[in-house]
Amino acid sequence: MEIFIINLIGATLRVSTPILLAAIGETYAERAGILNLGIEGTMFFGAFIGFFVADKSGSLWLGFLVAVLSGVVFGLLMALLTVTLGVNQHVSGLGITMLCTGLSLFAFRLNYGGRSIPPSIESFQQLAPFKNIPWLNTLTEQYLLTYVAFLVIVPLAWWLLYRTSFGLKIRSVGENPEAADAAGVNVFAVRYAALAIGGGLMAAGGAFLSLAQLGAFTHGIIAGRGWVAIAIVIFGNWNPVRAMWGALIFGGTSALQLRLQTMGLQLPIPYETFLALPYIVTIIALVLAGRNASYPAALLKPYRRE
Amino acid sequence: MYIVDMLGITKTFGELVANDNVDFQLRKGEIHALLGENGAGKTTLMRILYGLYRPDTGIIKVAEQPVEIHSPKDAIANGIGMVTQHFALVPPLSVAENIVLGNTDGFVVNRAAMEAKVAAAADRFGIVIDPKSLVRHLAVGQRQRVEILKALYRNARVLILDEPTAVLVPQEVDALFETLNRLKADGLSVIFISHKLHEVTQITDRVTVLRDGKLIGTVDTKDMSQSQLAAMMVGRETFGVTRKDEQHEQQPVTLRIDNLCAKNDQGMPALTNVCLEVKAGEILGIAGVGGNGQKELAESLCGVRDCASGSIQLAGKELIGKTPAGFTQAGVGRIPEDRHEGMVGDLTVTENLALEHLNEYTRSGVLDHKAIRTRAEELIHQFQIKARPNDPVRTLSGGNMQKVLLARVLSRNPKAVIVPQPTRGLDVGATDYVRQQLLEQRDRGAAILLISEDLDEILALSDRIAVIYEGEIVGILPAGEATPERLGLLMSGAVKEH
Amino acid sequence: METSRLRLRFVKTDNPPVWVRPLIPVLALVVTFILTSALIFWANANPFETYYHFLIAPLTTKVSALEILVKATPLMLTGAAVTFAFAAGYYNIGAEGQLFAGAIAAAGLGVAMKEVPAFITIPTIVIAGFAAGMLWATIPALLKVKLQVDEVVTTLLLNSVMGFIVSALLNGPWRDPNSGWPQSPEIGASAIFFKLIPRSRLNLGFVIGILVILVLWFVLTRTSFGLKMRAVGLGKPAARFAGIHVGRTTLIAALVSGGIAGIAGVAEVAGIQYHLIGDLSAGYGYTGIIIATLGSLNAVGVFIASLFFGLVDAGAQTVSRVLGVPVYLGEITQATMLLVALGFFLLQRYRLRRM
Amino acid sequence: ETPTAEAPVAAAPTAVAPAAAAPTAEVAAPAVTEPELPLFYGAYATPIEEPWDGVIHAALQQAAADGKIRYEFTDDIGYAGDMERVLREIAENQKPAAILGDAFGNEEAVRRVAVEYPEIAFAFGSGLGPAEPNMAVFDNWIHEPGYLSGMIAGGVTQSGVIGVVGGYPVPEVNRIVNAFIDGAKSVNPEAKVIVTFINSWFDPAAAKEAALAQVDAGADVLFAERFGVIDAAVEKGLFAFGNMSDQNALGPETVITGPVWNMAPTVDYLIAQVNAGTFTGMDLKDFSMVGKGGAYLADFHGMDAKIPAELLAKVKETEQQIKDGLFRVDIKEEPPVSD
Ligand SMILES: Nc1ncnc2c1ncn2[C@@H]1O[C@H](COP(=O)(O)OP(=O)(O)OP(=O)(O)O)[C@@H](O)[C@H]1O
Ligand SMILES: Nc1ncnc2c1ncn2[C@@H]1O[C@H](COP(=O)(O)OP(=O)(O)OP(=O)(O)O)[C@@H](O)[C@H]1O
Ligand SMILES: [Mg+2]
Ligand SMILES: [Mg+2]
């Protein structure tokens, strides 16, 4: 039983990583007042370009870097559309997802088209700092990026948001851009920056899948994880640390679901119930938070001076 | 020496010229009023100075040096601070965070240090505020203090206040003026926008008057009387309305409020056992310092707030539990406290005029556009609304918006009229117009409940005056017996009279 | 201030000149063409030829022209559904899930009513699909109206939940006993939408789509409910103050929106697929959002936008086939065109002025 | 032209809509200059990267490279109702000699179009039967090499637990998985097999996670019905079996072998039939079985060295028996259950 739980936790951390990265990215976007539905596409493109560059250059880290940069670029594109031009945020985001998906698959086809097995690369190796203690090893044998996500990105994202002037600007720009503007904050620049950071993190989440978890790129590599991340942002009340708990709950239920199947349990309910659970939990969390859910007040509203 | 020089400023919005070659000069250490009717271009000029708008042409000099002000950041760098009409604060953030926003010392924000620094600044300028509290928990007057402190914290040498007193109660106005005088003594310059001429004559040194975007002139305040200033603004001299005194004792009670209790948005009791009667042909004024339950009272009587208990009767019919539409149908005419809350800005004047009575223009669900349009044209003409039927309401000036609201309500000859703050933010001309309309309604026989924080307005219009304090009616006086002093005592909660 | 005389600036205007509007799609198309040409070259194709097959070739034969209408049918319906909700300020992102709710109803009843004549079955499944979409839309709508829970999120999440429900059905009780494939048994002939034109796929669904568009137009522009919806959408407090039941109006708009999306599901099942499958919708619910926005939330706009998307969708496959360009070019082009067009639409509210 | 192809056209005019009449009239002109090689068209619901359609694509590509046919294709048509339009357009505009693809999930659409174009040979992967005159069906009947793979798996497992990760429990998958299980139990009756379905054709991350869960539950040999599983085996240093194609490249030290589907025999047969004008709607099943080379055990790439010689011999023997028709692998299409 203990083993089962330790295994489960180890898997949960791994499964949560890409979603966590994306959710923090989305948190930044939404905190600045922009709902970025481009998340799914940005992750997909990150997964592709990371793989592509790593494959062609032989350097995983170069691939990862380029992936993050690509996310930044799509974040900036989202900013151009929604911040500068004031285009409807839903549609811009969906458009970017379409664009990213199309571009990735187009380029994938031209470069790797029609192979019967997916092209693969030597992926990132897992770290095993406690090789000699079996149970601890099960927990801690993780990819570097998982460590980075949980131990660096989460605290850093929290610190940046709540303890720095930049974070103060992001929060104020998402709450009341008029006020921020009048206080001398460059609303446009801050939103651009938040979307860029957000995009980078989303793409990092995608690249984790292709460069670490799989070492390959295929269609369906993201499989809706971006939409899950959006749910988690709200579940986490736009707070990176709480988003982490949301990501863990999601990762935990997915991992548990697979393990229960493995145990050959014939459940009286369809196993889809487990898959739907994180979504339902998020909705319930929202209901409980009710009108107290601290939506960034300026979410979805373009800001214009005149 | 001029600390600010704005020369030849022109600003157009589409076809509209909001500022037409305006010159504006501000001396060091003066309080300078900017005066003009609604839509005269005051706010526009100030937004240009603060970098929120870019002028089409014109030069700005600060301390005699030409400067480029592209954004509030530039303005702040040039020592200019602005408190806008609608507060520019971030409600979920603390006072300290709001104040340092955009002006933090370094990248890392040390909370304790930040709060200490803000507290020190508040001390220095004599502004009482707790840096730790969240802005969303503050009252309007306190929020304004945060705004002023925010500007001062950034070493503003020029402080722009756009209609700062519109939202303040008399005591708060006094406190504000005290602060302004102290700042003036420190050598700061203040630009003060207000529609209240007595305030202008009381506190300012000079006055610049705009009309239709054009500069009319700049004068020394001490040389001018209120009516002279008014004449400069609109080009005519006589102002004010006169109330025909009549005896209302014989009239039946139209609106009866019994033991009304209601809660505020935070769920705290805001009204306790309010009992009021308004007779036909009577204006009952509700005086009181803002935030004592006026908002809740008005909303309860408009049907948009659920009452905890009590009764509201119109000509004997109970209204409690009715929807806003039910209130209207029963014959209650009402305007909202914030006119923007009564209008859908993106709908046209015509549509807004019809909005409250759609059923009458509807046959089996289908709208009679022609009838709506005809009616709108009539009302626009009758109420002298300066707008075309198809203009989106958001493009109207405050005064005209108010006229649309009044037209919508008064054209139906309601039995009772609820008017919270009917002239807030309106220029003298528009104010007179609105007051005149209310008096006409009274003479027609309507029961009017006037809720206002402006004592002058209460005294000018009311037949009887009730004073509200902490959600209770602490006294009701006939107009003849009411003096500002007596009302002031009641409003401060020091005494109760029944 | 600097006073150079020849500076050009965009100036906001409330009355864009009339000639601007038709120009926008053309401009957007040109820019999209330029932006995507590089990709087309990369795929060793000629951009002009590509765009010919994309946008013109589908119009040249009757078969493919009819197919555009087939493709436009679900988009018309989801576009109308989204418009209905968005106009009332209710951001229904859940048309996708509601579509599936309608599809489930149609697939279930279509099988159950095998023996019932078509003139009963067809209206029944349409109404049932409407009701099912409505029912599924009730959850977020009630949460919104009663508990102020943001609908953007709940509708988005419920799409995924609906996906799992469909998956549970198709992998469980509804798995096709013949093929064992995760698809429901075929619906009865009496539930199948009749063809409008023989040897094509254009069916009753298209007529229903047109009807819904007409109803949408009528409700939005001619009825008091339409005005109420717009008032609520544009300013809730003001609408509430004016005595409009904001909650009720929102609820009705949300439910009708869900219902219309449900009909889209019915049309796919009864007109195209004849059974429920997990991949029934190529993201029609999401495309509906795009259609509604591109169509500026009005019925005529929605109609035109869905036809255009139908054309591009159909064209993409043609291009890929004829020129050997990866089919994903279609997606790229659609996305680029969408984003460019939206940008231009905003520009129309500005006028270039010499300062 | 053959009578079989012409007769229905002649018989059908009343049913032919005006829309289709015009293009049919044009057939005469290009017929003169028709190039020698017949055009084979691939119309795939999924991207060609998906293994099932990938096998068909690969075989057709090879045939084209060998100069037997001209080959064009379009893919990722999906299941949202586009298949019918695409097929019609292909039939109308390209007028290929044959169209191949997978009908699963688009079954009715394919059949509807097929009857309307009797002059074109339709050969589609399908779980249903063929239809006269021109709808031939095939399927990946690779349960036999699946059984052989299972035998090896049963022999090499140390823990006695074997993991299988599949997409959906559909007959096409169940057949292979059940045969694999039977194979394993034939050499190791005590072996415990755990089966997980990820309910997606394409989510390698989920597949890998499922495999890792099985490893945690004790599995030390994995059957990778889907992509992602081999990766888990590589990571854990375990043996795995590929599926559908030779997947050794995904883990040269990991993938022992696996059932391979080879469409070449089917395609070659189709080409012959089309060229001879003798094509009819038939079940091409046999061409996807071991007997005709349509299914086999993937090359070991040296991994056979890691298998006990005795086991290997037994596998080879069974393989031979299958080829000779002396051994029949049961076809079980019900969803497999974990032990
Ligand atoms: N952003 C804008 N777009 C279009 N027109 C505007 C804009 N801002 C102001 N205007 C117009 O410019 C004119 C001047 O407006 P401004 O706000 O400067 O008036 P004001 O003097 O401040 O009036 P008030 O006393 O009501 O505050 C008005 O007619 C107004 O309609
Ligand atoms: N987007 C806009 N388009 C056109 N005119 C505008 C726009 N925004 C504001 N205005 C005009 O600017 C003027 C000033 O706006 P402001 O928000 O100060 O309202 P106001 O009229 O002063 O009313 P109040 O004092 O009650 O706020 C208004 O009179 C309005 O006509
Ligand atoms: Mg103003
Ligand atoms: Mg004003």
Image (tube, coloured by chain):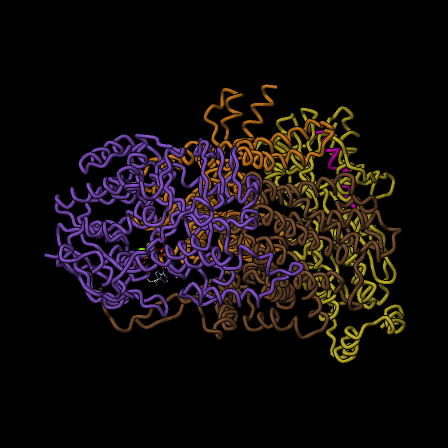
Given residues A233 and A261, the one toward you in this image is: A233
Q: Is D304 above or below relative to A112? A: above
* Image hue for chain B: purple
**Residue appearing at x 44%, y 31% in the figure:** B272
Given residues D293 and C100, the one toward you in this image is: C100
x, y percentage for residue A123?
51, 40
Instruction: Classify residue C10 by image quadrant.
Output: bottom left
Given residues D151 and B439, the one toward you in this image is: B439
**Residue appearing at x 71%, y 60% in the figure:** D42
For the N terminus of chain B, give its image quadrant.
bottom left
For the C terminus of chain B, give its image quadrant.
top left
Chief SS of the magenta region:
helix
Taking the magenta stretch, the answer to whether it contains residue D148 is yes
Taking the magenta stretch, the answer to whether it contains residue D137 is no
The single residue placed furthest to the left in the displayed view is B1
- The answer to whether residue C248 is left or right of residue B454 is right
x, y percentage for residue C249?
59, 50
* Image hue for chain C: brown
- Ligand 4 in which quarter: bottom left
Q: Is B281 above or below relative to D254? A: below
Q: Which chain is yellow?
A: D
Q: Which residues are magenta?
A: D141-156
- The answer to whether residue B125 is left or right of residue A55 is left
- The answer to whether residue D303 is left or right of residue D114 is left
Q: Which chain is orange?
A: A
